Amino acid sequence: MLRRLLLSVSLAATLMITASANAEQFVQVGDYEIHYSAVSTRFLTPEVAQANNIPRSANRGLVNVSVRERKEDGSTRPVNASIQGYVSGLTGSQESLSFRTVHDGDATYHLAPFTMQHDEAMRFDLDVRYDRNAAPESVNFIQRFYIER
């Protein structure tokens, strides 16, 4: 139990560090913040990757999306979301993203692995549904990756 807790804390810390490294990318929609980032799985420690069943490889990436609702007092709370989307490269190849949800204390992450393309701008097209009574919010971003060989 303690080992699982430590691995969860390590995953949360890793995801927060990589989000900070990506200049805290998010979209504000009303009272909701949709935070997103994409990183190489090589940033994860082997223990964290194994505990969370994340393939760790030089050419594998991980998309991380979290949704937070801003409350009246200025604090935020995590919100479950349903996320669908795909990533595509300049060559026209398209890969569907399969998101799974990880709950970790006061944080909820939606994670999806993908195949990185070396030195190629990759476009992420996501539909984020945080309110089942509203249409999903479209989140799009482009990121370039460099694979260590």
Image (cartoon, grey):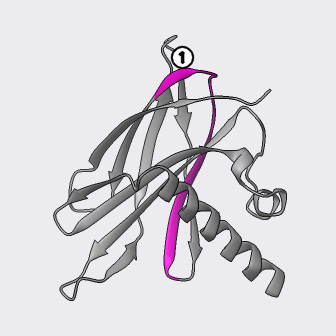
In the image, residue 79 lies at what x, y percent?
38, 71
Pick the front one: 138 or 76:
76
- Tell me the kind of residue under disc 1: Ser
Quadrant of the rendering where the N terminus is positioned: bottom right
In the image, residue 42 lies at what x, y percent?
74, 46
Read off the residue under disc 1: 93
Judge whether 73 appears above or below 29 on screen: below
What element does badge 1 sit on? loop
Is 1 on the left-hand or right-hand side of 100? right
Pick the front one: 22 or 115:
22
Residue found at x 37% / y 36%: 141
How many C-alpha atoms fall within 10 Å of the one at disc 1: few (<14), some, or many (≥20)? few
In the image, residue 98 lies at what x, y percent?
56, 44
Where on the picture, by quarter, is residue 8? bottom right
Q: Which residues are magenta?
A: 106-122
Judge whether 4 appears above or below 22 on screen: below
Residue found at x 32% / y 43%: 139
Residue found at x 42% / y 56%: 82
Pick the front one: 128 or 142:
142
Residue 100 visible at all: no
In the image, residue 104 lies at what x, y percent?
59, 76
Judge whether 19 appears above or below 71 on screen: above
Is 141 on the left-hand or right-hand side of 99? left
Is 35 on the left-hand or right-hand side of 50? left
